[in-house]
Amino acid sequence: MTLTGLNMAAFTVTPNAGGSSTSVAMLGLLKAFSMTADNEQVDSGGLADRYERMMNVKQGQVVDFTTFLSGSPQPVLTNLDIALWEFGSTNFLGSIRSGRLDISTESREASGIASAYKAPSATRTKVKLTTQKLVLTNVAFLGTLLTGSAASFDVTASLTWGGTAFVMPMTIKSAKQRVERDEVQLEEVVCTGKGTPTGPSDNSLLGNILLGTSQVALAIDTGGGQYNTGSGMWALITKLSTRFADAACIEQVGQFMFQGPASFATG
């Protein structure tokens, strides 16, 4: 029998917040999943060797995933659950077509020289907000970049969806106006972080990567394999992208990196 997505039995995440966080079962929201083990290699071939002689020196394990966001009263949040999309004191929600909030955890390798497995350690958090909006009368951001001073590029971005609020001082990195035949005019603005954000302090993935330790414990069962964090170790949320679009569910696309060897068992 060939296994399908229906054989997935568990996708559970437990954020590391003082060791007291409760686990969050996310299988009902999971849209896509992949688990990869990849060996870092070096060529040990001698000067007279014609062919490579590769040696495995350290392994890293990565989980890539896409999930829907849960909400109330509906089980999954959509574009209709976005309540605020504000830059400064102006709410652009009525002209937003799509957007993406990208958060990444910068890390450095922290495993010992005798370890066969990578153990990335978080060093910094980076945030980027990309917004596509309709041009109703005038461009809102491109003109500021072309004629404004450096101080005028700074904004406070505020987003609210399904009860989740994100607020952060940011600066405008780029703006672009696009005009095509048979299409509405669109403006895209990209903002990057310029200070400390405020956001959910809960045990959600967003709260953990944005304000928490970025560490989680994992319990994953595909029916064909079980991939879990081992005793006393964690996985690092290296990136999380919350994606918004018109007439669509709100999704989060992210990645975990194991901080040590994964615990594996057959399904």
Image: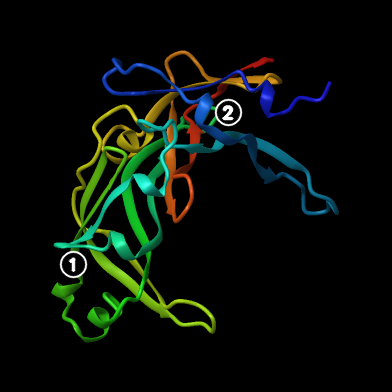
Q: Which residue is mark 2?
A: 116
Q: Answer above or below: position of 226 versus 95.
A: above
The numbered dot on residue 108 is none
Q: Quadrant of the C terminus?
A: top right
- How crowded pointer 1 is (Cα within 10 Å; few <14, some 14-19, many 20+) is rated as some
Residue at (54% x, 81% y) in the render: 182
Q: Position of residue 27 (x, y in %)?
A: 53, 25
Residue at (14% x, 62% y) in the render: 89
Q: Are marks 1 and 2 in contact (CB under 8 Å)?
A: no
Residue at (48% x, 26% y) in the render: 26
* Disc 2 secondary structure class: loop
Q: Quadrant of the N terminus?
A: top right
- Is residue 81 visible in the rendered image? The answer is yes
Name which residue type carries label 1.
Asp
Q: Which residue is mark 1?
A: 154
Name which residue type carries label 2.
Ala
Q: Position of residue 153 (x, y in %)?
A: 20, 72
Lower position in the chain sequence, tag 1 or tag 2: 2
* Left or right: where 176 falls relative to 229: left
* Disc 1 secondary structure class: strand
